[in-house]
Every structure is written in structure tokens, then in C-alpha cells.
Image (tube, rainbow, N blue to C red):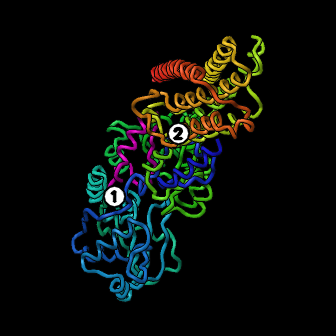
Amino acid sequence: PQIALAQGARSMVKQNALIRRLPAVETLGSVTYICTDKTGTLTENVMTVEKVDAQPDKEELLLHAMMLNNEVRFSQDGEMLGDSTEKALVSYAQTKGLSREGSARQYPFKGKVPFDSDRMMMSTLHQHNGEWILFVKGAPAAIASALSDRHSGQVENWLNTNRQWASEGLRVLFFATRTFREKPETLTPELERDLDFLGMAAMIDPPREAVTEAIAECSTAGIKTVMITGDQMLTAKAIARRLGMGDDNMEARAGKDLATTAWDEFVQKVKDVVVYARVSPEQKLQIVKALQQNNQFVAMTGDGVNDAPSLKQADIGVAMGVTGTDVSKEASDMILLDDNFATIVKAVKEGRRIYENIRKFILYVLSCNLAEVLTISVAPIFGMPIPLLPIHILWINLVTDGLPGIALTAEPAEPDIMKRPPRPPRENLFAGSMASDIIIAGAILAAAALHTQYRLAAQGYDIAVQQTAVFTILCLVQLGNALTVRSVNHPLIGKGMLSNPAMWGIVLLTIGLQALIIYVPVLHDLFKTTSLEWPVVRLILLTWVICLVLLEVGRQVRKKRIQSAMKTIA
């Protein structure tokens, strides 16, 4: 199992998912909810200004506000660094002929009131023609509530425009200003009142490629995707509809509603919510806890320092590799190297594959070991000599059991692996019919070995031939067991039989080594074997074919049982 987990972690890195805690490789297959940020995870995080509406005679001042009211920095080669929304605003101002240097000369920067999620706005103070200008940028509702009374007759029209743009999936920001004759003594949020409206800008952040398909795949796999965003509700719901997460009637909650909702009520309703808008990091933690109280296995994404508590609380914390802070990465179980939601779904699929392969490995190894125990125990009961010597058992365990077992951990995912519901996180590896499958397969393998020895003993072959034949048939039927265990859906011969070349390479290698042990005289003393005549080989091959047929019947039974269980759950 540890080999399977390590191989899985390496495979996930190739798909841009870096596993920080090895057990997460396997537990990813239990995820029932993925709570994900919108910007940069579901969308490209490449903002472009789509629409601008400036007040009469305020367009130039609005452009200066776009250029200066931000924390965008420029590298030595002129590349913009910072938040994608702010970079889009600066880029738009540049297309209108402004530059950072030119705006800064006209409006020298003197200080700022940083953005925070409670106020939903940011302010910068500048000096201009002997006056002090406060540029304010923020959420439409926040800016509207801080405007001067002289705008009271127009505010509703501006908010209606905001609602229309937001319903198209655009992120809308309002801009305003306030002029002071003297420099304010302190820069505090209290200055953000009695504002003069400058205008609004709307930006589009297109959905990432393959995200819609990934969300649909999650739905088929019994995983619910939940969007958590700082955007306003209309924008969030529009993007959710575009991504196929729900329709106009989808359940959505705003952060302010969560703040006034009783905890017990929220726990009851949390499973129905698809979109959370204007949510704080503290509320993200509440969402995780509420889902976990409903016995859900939650994956949560995050990139900021304040996201660390929710990432730690989540069953699978997922940090962003590109935009994430070191604190968020330390708190996570997995890091998305490309910040892409589709990568989470790939990781979940890989987690399911690895868990299935671990079960296949256990089924194979334990059924083979049981066959050896039964063969050695039952043969004397029927008056037959000891069928296997210690060197035979050692070879079987190291080569015939070990090598195919390792190959099983590399099996590709079953075609329907993302059409099954998530497994319970605390499910025992022997859940379902695993124990009975082990016993039945072990009994079939042992019966093949005992049948071979019984026939040879009845025909008068000496003990060396009997032991060599039992040794050989056990090797062959165990290889056949590995081939039937590797896939529930695919028959031993047919579609998918070559999907794991390593397995076939190991099977051919093991058969070749077994032939050398039998027919190279110099190896006879070491492995306590003897050459087998054609009648003995024919008996072994016939018994092997019958055993393969019985194992294939067992595979079909397992397939029908899984399909029946899936229908019951559905």
C-alpha cells in the first residue's frame, strides 16, 4: 500500500497536484463536497474591463482613480504585479492614454486606507492643486451607502446598472472621491463618507477551460461543488449558472445572511447551498464545520493567510500554488500547482484509483497466501506428501506474489470509477464482500494445486515430480489470479487487456523464470525441482485453464455485485 500511495503522489505531481501529506492520496477518494474559490480556480484570473460608465465630466478623474487606487507594482521590465482585478483597471487606464508616472505627478500619493472584507472598499489619498483628494474604490452596495445625499435620486439607477451587469457574470466596482481643503489628521475608514460618485467599471473573468466538464464529472461521481467568493451574489450566481452548477433557483447565501443565521439552522440547510457570496475567511471555517456535522467529507480551497484555519479544518485542505501564501500552503494537504479546479477533480479520480488498486493488491496477495496455506494443510489429510518445500514457498512469495502485486498498484482507473458514489472515509479495506472474495479465490487456487497433486500421485509419479508440479501450478494460477483481479469491468482477454503493460511483462518474465527452474539442471538442486514430462505439463495446463475460467466467473460475479450496489445507492 505504501508503494501505491507513493506512486500515486508522483502521478499527481505530473497532473499539477502536489501532495504534502501521503494519506491524502487515498482519502481524496472519499470527498463528497468541494468548496472552492471562484477567482483563479474556477476562472482564469485574467480580468479584462468590459464596461465603464463614468459620470458626466468625470471620465478623466475616474481613469486617474483606476490608475492610482490600487496596490499594483511594476517590475523592472514593466510587467504588472498584483491583484488581477486591479491590474485590469490599470491596463484599461493605460489604453486611454494614462501612465502610472503621469497620474502620480498630477496626484502624488500621500497614504491609503487598505481594503478589508468588512468595509468592502479601499481608499488612497492624493494631493492636487493645493487640495487633498481621496479616491475610493469598492463594492457597489458599500460605495452607494457612503455617497453624499446629493446623489440620493440617482443611486437606485446606478445600483440597477450594477445588477444588470452582475447578472451577466461581470464583476462590478464603484468609484467615488472626496475633496479636503486641508490634509486629514489621520487616515481612517471614517473618511469614507459624503462621497462624490465618479462612475463604475465591470470586468469579466472567463471560466477556465475544462472546468465545466470537471464540475459535471463531480456531479456524476456523487460530489457536490460549492462556490465561495467575495463577489456580489448576482455575479457569483451568473458564473455558477455558466459553469453548470445550478439554475436560477439554486440555493445561495450571502455572508451577511450567515452572520445572522442560527448555527443549528445553518447546519440543517448547508447541504443545499451551491453559492456563497461576500463570505469572510471566518465564515469559510463555519461552512466546513457545518458540512462535517452532516457527515460530509470536505475539500476546501484557499490561498490567503486567513484561509489557514478552514484549510486545517477541512478533511482535504487545498492551497493554491501560484497565488497561495506560504501560510496557506503549510496548512494544506495538497497544493494545486496550476490553481485549477479541474486539477482537484483529477486528484480525486487518482485517489479513487489508488484505493481500488490497494484493495486489488490485498485481494490478490491474501488469496494467494490462503491458497498456499490450504494446499500445505489439506494435502496430508488425503494422504499425500508435503506438496511444497520452503524454497518453493519463498520463491512464490517473493516473485509470484510480489512482482504482480506491485504491478497491480499501477493499474489504470476503471472506466466507471467517477460514476460511483464516494466511499465512506472510514470504510474498512475488507468492506463489502472482500473477505468472501479472498476465501473463494484462495479455495479455487488451492483446489487446482491439490487436484494436480492428487492426479499425479494416483498415476504413480514420485514426490519430486508432485512437488515440482504443485509448485508450478501454484505459480501459474496465481498469475491468472492477478490478471482477473486487475479489472472488474474487463475480461481476462479482450478490451483493456493491454492497459497495464507492466503486468503482462511480469507475467511473461515469471513464466520464463519458472521454466528455467524446471528445465535447467543446474538449478534443480537449488530449487528442489525436477524436469516435467509432457503428460505432467499437459495436466498442469489443463488445470490452469479450468482455474482461469472459474476465476473469470468470480470476476463476473463481483462486477454484477458492484453494479447492483451502485443502483441501490442511486
Q: Residue furthest left?
A: 56
Residue assigned mark 1? 205
Identified by mark 1, the residue type is: Asp
Mark 2 vs mark 1: give the one in front. 2
Q: Nearer the viewer, residue 282 or 45?
A: 45
Q: Nearer the viewer, residue 444 or 427?
A: 444
Residue for point 52% across, 55% down: 13
Residue for point 27% across, 53% down: 160
Q: Is residue 562 above or below residue 341?
A: above
Place of residue 451 in the rendered image (x, y in percent of width and height, measured from the top left) = 64, 15
Q: Determine whether, in the image, residue 208 is placed left or right of residue 526.
A: left
Q: Nearer the viewer, residue 394 or 102?
A: 394
The answer to whether residue 509 is visible is yes
Residue assigned mark 2? 503
Identified by mark 2, the residue type is: Met
Q: Determine whether, in the image, residue 557 is placed left or right of residue 365.
A: left
Place of residue 498 in the rendered image (x, y in percent of width and height, measured from the top left) = 44, 38
Tell me the magenta residue range. 206-234
Q: Classify 10 Å Cα crowding around label 1: few (below 14), some (14-19), many (20 and above).
A: many
Place of residue 458 in the rendered image (x, y in percent of width and height, measured from the top left) = 68, 11
Disc 2, SS? helix
